[in-house]
Image (cartoon, rainbow, N blue to C red):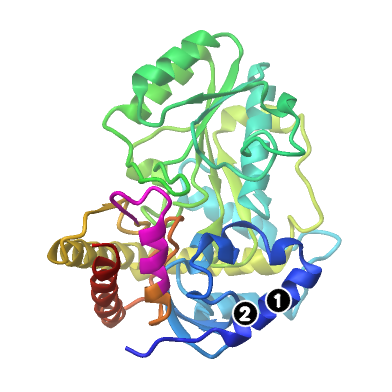
Amino acid sequence: MKEYEFKKSLALFERAKAVIPNGGQGPRHPDFFKFGSYPIFYHRGQGAYVWDVDGNEYIDYMCAFGALVLGVNHPRVEEAANSQAALGDCLTLPTERYVEFAEYLNANLPIAQWVLTGKNGSDVTQFATRIARIATGKKGIVMAHGAYHGFHFWSAEPGPGIPEEYMSHVYHHNYNDIDDLTEVVKRHSGDLAAIIITPVRHDFAKDQELPAPGYFDAVRKLCDKEGMVFIMDDIRCGFRFKFEGSHEYFFAEPDMVCFGKAIANGYPLSALVGKIELLDAIKKASFSATHFYSAVPLAASLACMEEVKTSGAIEKIYQLGSMLKQGMENQACNHAIAVRYTGHPAMPFMIFENDPVFEKAKFFGGEAAKRGIIFHPLHNWFVSAALEEKDIKKTLDVTDHCFKLTKEKFG
């Protein structure tokens, strides 16, 4: 297989470092990959494929970190977005799309008895905790160790510039550990406003965990007993497991659900929905920003959600994700390489055994990237409905070769 080169990407990164701190931020930064073996900048995308600034073609299993559930430039979504763009996007007052979006969620998702819009997942997870505090008159928020609920200080990893006080009412438990959660709730009883939790444990650089039997039932019972609000952070998983929400897929009963990423197939939009009992609390706080009402993302979302609902996208993603999982697990076994392939087929992640600093993972991912397949070595992957079986087969041809190379290098 011919290996790609990244001369233009590397040159552009040098330019970026001159004007952008570190040349970029977050898990897209080349430090999180194997430097020199991955592209650093894309140029364009179509469907499940992307092309970098060097002209190299890839199947991208990151899907803009989960936003592209239907693939890049989906015709139905782009038609709706372009039609609205011709009328206007960011205007002084909301457009009809604002109401239509809320009506659509209300009609299709039983949990959506009211609807608020934001831009990023962090917007709505942050406001959900505020609603819970108003509704209960308490301050404490319970979250899982290692969980990511956005970049706001209350949920971010402690670090420079984040005063300890921001975390003074945030308490942690071990995901899937009912006994530990019960102990945390008991320890802080009387001061707890909410528990916020993801449908699946998808921590950075960790094995994923599906919820254990009875886990969400225990969360619901503890919330009812302590008067806490149950917040489901469905930003990453939403519209991938079940159209009505991941909470319905796992039979959980939250009071509020946060959506984002796949809700608009790459257009900047998030949503917070919930039960009518919380409406009075919402009315006591303001949730408004310049771009929260922008019409183009709302139009794109309406088209995206309807396409996901009617096209069989979720079923297709599950089928193709299962095909990828079975293929890669079989290849690893055939090459006598021990791996842990975890998570839902729509959002898998693979970790090599005995790879504490992810040296094997970065090598494997870098060799795959040089042959046209994008996996992140530290972040969970995503399967999009734009993929076809031939793309999975093409991927497996590359991964089989990369397992061989990994075995040769590391034994």
Give the vertical position of 15 relative to 91 (above or below): below
Residue at which label 2 appears: 10
Q: Is residue 310 above or below residue 252?
A: below
Answer whether residue 212 is visible to the viewer in this image.
yes
Q: In this figure, which residue is indicated by the disc labeled 1?
A: 14
Q: Residue at position x 58%, y 8% from top?
A: 190
Q: Secondary structure at mark 1?
A: helix
Q: Residue at x 30, y 77 (%)?
A: 395
Answer above or below: position of 207 versus 256: below
Q: Is residue 214 found left or right of 337 in the rendered image?
A: right
Contact flag, marks 2 and 1 (Cβ < 8 Å): yes
Q: Count residues near mark 1 (Cα–Cα under 10 Å), then give few for <14, some for 14-19, many for 20+.
A: few
The foreground one among 75 and 166 is 166
Of the pair 347 and 89, the residue shown nearer to us: 347
Name the image quarter holding the N terminus. bottom left
From the top left corner, tell me how far across and down residue 317 is, in percent: 33, 65
Say which amino acid is labelled 2: Leu
Quadrant, the C terminus: bottom left
Q: Nearer the viewer, residue 119 or 33?
A: 33
Coordinates of residue 402 in the picture (x, y in percent): 29, 73
Q: CA distance from mark 2 to mark 1?
A: 6 Å
Q: Residue at x 55, y 38 (%)?
A: 274
Residue 288, how many percent across, how many down? 78, 47
Residue placed most toward the observer, 162 or 153: 162
Q: Say what amino acid the circle numbered 1 marks.
A: Glu
Q: Quadrant of residue 380?
A: bottom left
Query: Which image quadrant is residue 338 in?
Result: bottom left
Residue at image point 61% right, 40% down: 125
Q: Which residues are magenta?
A: 350-366
Horizontal side of residue 173 vs 30, given as left or right? left
Q: Is residue 134 rendered to the left or right of residue 249?
A: right
